[in-house]
Image (spheres, rainbow, N blue to C red):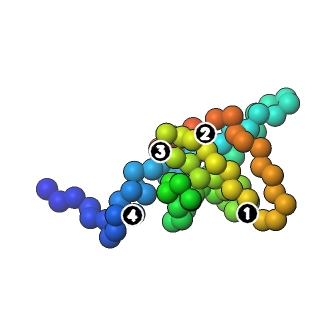
Amino acid sequence: MRFPVAHSAREAVMEDYPESYELIFQASAVDDVVVVRRTDQAGAGGSPIYEDETGIVRAEISARGEVRMLASGGHQAHELPVTARRTASV
């Protein structure tokens, strides 16, 4: 039996994280849900950085689901999501 081999230790660690998350922000009437996908980058805490398709919503998400929102431009002040949940596998 053969197992896939990661090219580096960092690559192996990144594969342990989900491909995408849904960030759920509490809004007045209904919750706002933003889907973010894993990038090749890692944040200051060593966890992968996830971003939405526009690149505006960026977050470092730990293996325990802890979210740290990251600014993608000047003068941004993101609200913290209420929940980060893994998206269903396709």
Q: Which residue is mark 1?
A: 72
Q: Earlier in the sequence, mark 1 or mark 2?
A: 1
Q: CA distance from mark 3 to mark 4?
A: 15 Å
For the point 81% across and 34% down, which residue is it? Answer: 27
Instruction: Estimate the x, y position of residue 68 in percent, counting from the top left.
Output: 64, 48
At label 4, the amino acid type is: Glu
Q: CA distance from mark 1 to mark 4?
A: 24 Å
Q: Which residue is mark 3?
A: 63
Q: Earlier in the sequence, mark 1 or mark 3?
A: 3
Q: Earlier in the sequence, mark 3 or mark 4?
A: 4
**Closest to the observer, 33 or 79:** 79
For the point 57% across and 45% down, which residue is it? Answer: 21
SS class of the residue under badge 1?
loop
Q: Which residue is mark 2?
A: 84
Q: CA distance from mark 1 to mark 2?
A: 19 Å
Q: CA distance from mark 1 to mark 3?
A: 22 Å
Instruction: Estimate the x, y position of residue 47 in percent, counting from the top left.
Output: 50, 54
For the point 39% across and 63% down, which residue is it? Answer: 10
User: Are discs 3 and 2 less than 8 Å apart at CB?
Assistant: no
